[in-house]
Amino acid sequence: MIRLIASDVDGTLIQDSTPNLYPEMEEMIRRLKEKGILFCAASGRQYQSLKNVFRNVADDIAYIAENGAHIRYQHKNISVTPMKREYVEGIMKMLRPYYGECETIISTPNGSLVESKNQAFIDLITYGYHNTFRQVNDVLSQEDEIIKIAVYKKGSIRSLGESCFIPAWEQNIKACMAGEEWVDFMDKSVDKGNGLKILEEHLRIDRQETMAFGDNDNDLGLMQAAGESYAVETAPEHVKRAAGAICPGWREKGVYQIIKAKIFQ
């Protein structure tokens, strides 16, 4: 029997960089709660952005935010995993020469820090993601606890990410594609799959009682931590091979379709 359903958000549940969940899925989350099944949003997004997406059912779900660096349930932090300062400094030193081509957003448990003055990027994280953030001249001069660094390139960052950014750091930290336009850096232990395991243990839910959905590299661990897993049909081939099954993408409301078919029929 399924007791916990975890889904990636951007590219799996809804279109990338968008702020709204469709009404059918909101109603599905309410129906799941009535049936004793918890829905969990598992995303590279910050908690505040996720809470906005799920604003009409925000108190009914759990959150694996920042790829698992920040886990919350019932208004409490279950787990927060900071990055080592030396790695933060090294990554920022690597990324700053790419300013103009790429943008960065640095996550803390209470919001994000942004050095960019690019209005298009500011508009994206303000109106697309609805992030809570503050603009600073130098991230490294701040005293905030940093849990994730994300680098963005409009259109696609995959070539640059897979050839440069990820190889430079993957031996020391978790570095991965988090969508076609994003590369994420976190502590080595941070992974959506580890986040799901922490939540499963907290709730005393077995892996075989968990269902998961994803579409990218940062969802591989999530799918492995669930007894039943789905990759959307738009996912890269290696992600689809790692999943237990394939489902329709966000355009066809695939997550909703599978939950309705598996749980309510």
Image (spheres, rainbow, N blue to C red):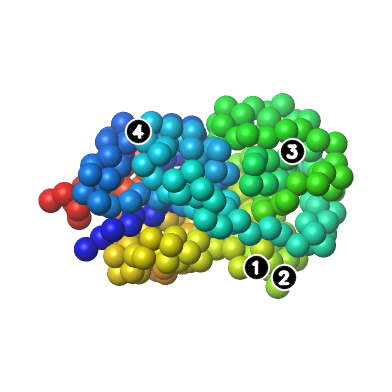
Residue 31: x and y, percent? 23, 42
Q: Position of residue 113 (x, y in %)?
A: 73, 40
Point out the tag, 2 or 4, that comes first from the N-terminus.
4
> Earlier along the polypeptide chain: callout 2 or callout 1?
2
Residue 157 is left or right of residue 140, and the answer is left
Q: Nearest the camera: 115 or 34?
A: 34
Reading the image, the residue beneath label 4 is 22
The residue drawn where x is 31% and y is 39% is: 25
The residue to which callout 1 is attached is: 188
Tag 2: amino acid: Asn
Q: Is residue 5 above or below residue 22?
A: below
Closer to the N terminus: mark 4 or mark 3? 4
Q: Is residue 91 left or right of residue 215?
A: right
The residue indicated by pointer 2 is 172
Q: Position of residue 36 (x, y in %)?
A: 25, 51
How many neighbours does mark 4 have within 10 angstroms: few (below 14), some (14-19), or many (20 or more)? few
Label 2 vs label 4: CA separation? 39 Å
Q: What's the amino acid at mark 4? A: Tyr
Q: Quadrant of the N terminus?
A: bottom left
In space, the residues marked 1 and 3 are separated at their CA atoms by 23 Å
Task: Judge depth for marks 1 and 4 and give the one in front.
Answer: 1
Q: Which mark is residue 10?
A: none
Indicate left or right for 115 with 128 as reference: right
